[in-house]
Image: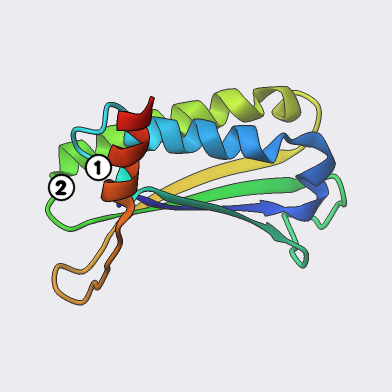
Amino acid sequence: MPHIWIEYSANLAPSIDLPAVMAEVQAAAVGDGSVFPLAGARTRAVPVQDYRIADGHPDNAFVHVLLRVGHGRSEAERDALGQRVFATLRKAFAPIMAQRPLGLSLQVDEAHPTLNYKHSNYREYLAERAAAR
């Protein structure tokens, strides 16, 4: 882990380079890989078509990021993650925020210690790809 959900109001779609935002947010979340391994990272972005923000003006927009991390990280590690990713998010959306109403939010959740099931072979493929370079 981390698993990353980026929800955004659909009215932002023409203004954002979504693949770049996803890559920047994931890179900020993983950092050097010592706490949050790249093999555990899953990032997805979901446009929200139906929403109402504040007074309902059509220019109003939002981006909400949910970071879910595995159990066992300290509060300081989770806070550092949140601070790092939120700084990246603010930088990525600063040009848009300078031009229109935009709300940015981020939440860090911790997965349940036992009710959390997963299985993957990403690490093996990452190792093969690295060896091939």
Q: Residue at x 19, y 33 (%)?
A: 34
Location of residue 97 (image quadrant): top right
The answer to whether residue 83 of the structure is visible from this angle is no
Q: Is residue 69 above or below residue 26?
A: below
Q: Give me the residue at 17% from left, 37% from top.
A: 76
Q: Is residue 127 visible?
A: yes
Mark number for residue 78? 1
Q: Secondary structure at mark 1?
A: helix
In the rendered image of this protein, does residue 9 appear above or below residue 101?
below
Q: Residue at x 63, y 42 (%)?
A: 103
Q: Earlier in the sequence, mark 2 or mark 1?
A: 2
Three-letter code, disc 1: Arg
* Residue at the image position 31 percent from the left and 40 percent from the top: 128
As drawn, is 54 to the left or to the right of 28? right
Residue 109 vs residue 114: left or right? Answer: right
Position of residue 62 measured from the top left corner of the image (x, y, whole percent): 67, 47
- Residue 113, given in percent of the width and then of the height, sits at 14, 67
Q: CA distance from mark 2 to mark 1?
A: 7 Å
In front: 2, or 93?
Answer: 2
**Residue assigned mark 2:** 73
**What is the basis of the colouring in this image?**
rainbow
Taking the image as shown, residue 57 lies to the left or right of residue 12, namely right
For label 2, the SS is loop
